[in-house]
Amino acid sequence: MKTLFLVRHAKSSWKYPRLDDFERPLNKRGRKNAPLMGKILRQLKVKPGLIISSPANRAAMTARIIADKIHFPLKKIQYDESIYDSSETDLMRIIADFDDGIKAAMLVGHNPGLTLLANTIGNYPVSNIPTGGVFCVGFDISAWSKIEPNSGELKFFEFPKNHP
């Protein structure tokens, strides 16, 4: 059994229009929602063996905040540039390379790739994983490379607007 948490970065700031997209930080709402989602994940007893994130500032910040809330060591977060601006096919390749000894993994990234991936691998269609959203899917497999379209079962789908 494998569990995959797809986490879309929290709300980012557009305050500095000249700032490169990769460098955009979280805005005030994002800095509030990321810890909220981390707290919710802690309450759900989420304990990934791997957190891998896009190194884009807003995704990396989200990954660090959530990791802190669920007591995952910050120094163990991995960053992969190919997550930034990736398709669902690219994300599937990244996941297929996860160590099979890891039972639960968290991927922190961006739309549209994450939503497309959720709809490819899951059994619960979603129109959008909103900023700060977490789409959790379970698989009855022994190897990450065995994930196939529609092979995952939705465990939960949480996002900040569910928790005003």
Image: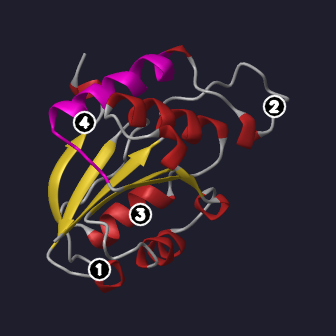
Q: Which of the two labelled residues, at mark 2 and mark 1, occupies the earlier sequence position?
A: 2
Query: Is 125 on the left-hand or right-hand side of 66?
Result: left
Query: Is 59 on the left-hand or right-hand side of 48?
Result: right
Q: Amino acid at mark 2?
A: Leu
Q: Is residue 42 magenta?
A: yes
Q: Amino acid at mark 3?
A: Leu
In the image, residue 65 above or below residue 48: above
Q: Which residue is mark 2?
A: 19
Residues marked 3 and 4 touching at CB (< 8 Å): no
For the magenta stretch, what is the residue range? Answer: 29-48
Q: Which residue is mark 1?
A: 149
- Figure quadrant of residue 15: top right
- Residue at mark 4 to residue at mark 2: CA–CA distance: 31 Å
Expressed as whole percent of the image width and height from the top left, the position of residue 37 reads 32, 30
Q: Is residue 3 visible?
A: yes
Dot 1 crowding, Cα within 10 Å, few <14, some 14–19, many 20+: some
Of badges 4 and 2, the one in the foreground is 4
